[in-house]
Image (tube, rainbow, N blue to C red):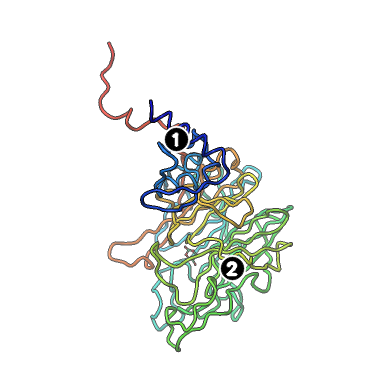
Amino acid sequence: MKIITVTTLCISLLLSSQCLAFTNETNKNTTFDLSKYSQEDFDYLAIKDPTKLSAASKRALERNYHKNADWFGRFSTQTLQGDFSFEEGVTRRDPSKVLLIDGLYYTWYSKAVGPSYGFGTGDPDKKVFPWDKTEIWYATSKDGNTWKEQGLAVGRGAKDSFDDRSVFTPEVLAHNGQYYLVYQTIKAPYLNRTKNQVGMAYANSPHGPWTKLNKPILSPANNGVWLGEEDNRFLVKKQGDFDSHKVHDPTLMYYNNKFYLYYKGERFGEKTTAGGREIRWGVAIADKPEGPYVKSEFNPITQSGHELAIWHYQDGIAMISCKDGPEQGTMQFAKDGVNFEIMSYITNVPDAIATVTSLDGDKYPGAALQWGLSHKYVIPAGKQWFEGHNQITKFTFRPNRNKRQYESSMGKVKKQK
Ligand code: AAL
């Protein structure tokens, strides 16, 4: 009782000042603004004495774990039927966002046929990776489970054009009656040091025909410097910007009356970080869908995230990252589309998440992820990852809220007679 009274008194005193400096045994002269938090916050986080905050308790307060329960949840994935069931020797991967048009769901994706051999075979025509020598195809579905492949949307460019080797990993934006596809491009030959760019095609129907812009809308920064002539992307004199080597996974969003092109950057001399590959994301902004796109001065805007799913949430932009980097497996939110804060940690994030734009994503943070598309690898026993193929899968995401307490369902409950 005495302790409670002293604590309550202490809290009232603390909250009456704006920002207090306090010390404790392990962390002297630490300033922490307690005025932002209420007794309810402290109680939720089991903080007995706010003048004695451990690093974990400070982090929990600062990151609002006690208010972000709605951002946490769990994924599960399942295989699909029709043309998205696995087809031997065929890769379908990196689906775009799903659009609902006149009662039919549409998605665009990379498609390739035949085996991949990796770099260094000595034969420049041999397919390197599952996404090499791909084209962009599209499919439709009435229910999101059974899909019908409709045909080619965007093919590779003529020899010597910037997209003559592969067009892949598309994203789609429907805006003012037009459809825009943005996608990665490679110009042959496809070597370790080959740069990758981003192209765009537009159409006034989801069935096309698609008109390609004749030059890329986004290119890597030009300030990395290779060391020597060997085709080795890890040997560098200078790494350059976060996107000096490749610009990947373009995602086009209409936001605040502008076009936000989010993209993954890969860097000359990529290092291995605590969280995996050295990967960051940036954004480039334009007034018109076809550009010109100007890279944000705040880039990089993430320090992680191989593939990101990005969607509108209330007035801002939400995203989730799957692998690579110390912040992989986090859901994040940026009120301004640029400055992302971690809202939750999520396990088992599927690869290449594509959201369904017709879902009401504003209902709660994970509502845009109720279901969507992803992809998985099918790798025969004894083969390396790049020798396998991909198939498009479906995921569902269930928020943790309103869940029955695990403990209460454990153990046998005797039936009452
Ligand atoms: C994917 C994406 C991009 C990469 C490759 C194909 O996971 O990040 O699309 O280039 O892998």
**Which numbered mark, 1 or 2, is in the foreground of this view?**
1
Q: Residue furthest top?
A: 417
Residue at 43% x, 51% y is 349
In the image, residue 363 lies at what x, y percent?
58, 38
Real-space CA distance between mark 1 and mark 2, rounded to the nearest whole angstrom: 55 Å
Image quarter of residue 328? bottom left
**Quarter that holds the C terminus:** top left
Residue 316 image position (x, y, % from top left)? 63, 49
| Left or right side of 14 for 102 | right
**394, 331: nearer the viewer:** 331
Q: Nearer the viewer, residue 349 or 405?
A: 405
- Is ligand 1 closer than 8 angstroms to the Cβ of mark 2? no
Q: Nearer the viewer, residue 369 or 71?
A: 71
Residue indicated by mark 1: 44
Place of residue 319 in the rendered image (x, y in percent of width and height, measured from the top left):
54, 52
Label 2 neighbourhood size at 10 Å, few (<14), some (14-19), many (20+)?
A: some
For badge 2, the amino acid type reads Gly
Question: Is 384 left, or right, of 214 in this rendering?
Answer: left
Q: Earlier in the sequence, mark 1 or mark 2?
A: 1
Q: Is residue 374 above or below residue 410?
A: below
Q: Circle 2 is placed at which residue position?
A: 155
Q: Residues within 10 Å of mark 1 (few under 14, many from 20)?
A: few
**Residue that appears at 56% across and 39% down:** 364
- Amino acid type, residue under disc 1 in the picture: Tyr
Q: Quarter holding the N terminus? A: top left
